[in-house]
């Protein structure tokens, strides 16, 4: 199964960017979304931003992921 996670673009340098997902910051390749700007939201998969995403949809998805993480029970 593949999972793409939404994140906010914090900075861009060439074809690399820093993306924030919750409180985590990651370096990602931006070559697949050349039109991306700082403060945009993207879907990130395997170290690459693969698609731009609407801010509202990104926040809905992040809220769902946060809820899932909080409800996870380890046995």
Image (cartoon, helix red, strand yellow):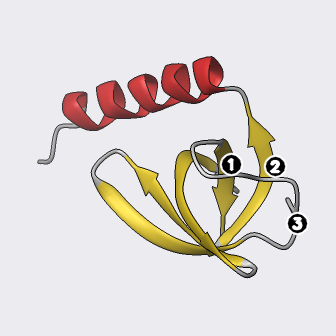
Sequence-wise first label, 2 or 3: 3
Mark 2 lies on a secondary structure that is: strand
What x and y, as percent, mark residue 13?
63, 79
Contact between labelled residues 2 and 1, with CB atoms less than 8 Å apart: yes
Could you give the CA–CA distance between mark 1 and mark 3, rounded to whole angstroms?
A: 11 Å
What x and y, as percent, mark residue 75?
11, 48
What x and y, as percent, mark residue 30?
75, 69
Quadrant for residue 26, please give it: bottom left
According to the picture, the residue beneath numbered tag 3 turns out to be 32
Sequence-wise first label, 1 or 2: 1
Q: Which mark is residue 43?
A: 1
According to the picture, the residue beneath numbered tag 2 turns out to be 51
Q: Relative to 60, does residue 23 appear above or below in the rendering?
A: below
Contact between labelled residues 3 and 2, with CB atoms less than 8 Å apart: yes
Sequence-wise first label, 1 or 3: 3
Q: Residue furthest left?
A: 75
Could you give the CA–CA distance between mark 1 and mark 2, rounded to whole angstroms?
A: 5 Å
Q: Quadrant of the N terminus?
A: bottom right
> How many labels, in total?
3
Write the residue at 73% across / 82% down: 14
């Amino acid at each position: 199964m593949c999972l793409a996670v939404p994140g906010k673009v914090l900075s861009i340098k060439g074809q690399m960017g820093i993306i924030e997902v919750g409180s985590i910051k990651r370096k990602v390749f931006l070559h697949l979304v050349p039109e991306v700007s700082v403060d945009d939201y993207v879907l990130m998969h395997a170290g690459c931003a693969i698609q731009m995403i609407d801010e509202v949809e990104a926040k809905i998805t992040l809220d769902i992921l946060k809820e899932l993480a909080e409800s996870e029970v380890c046995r």
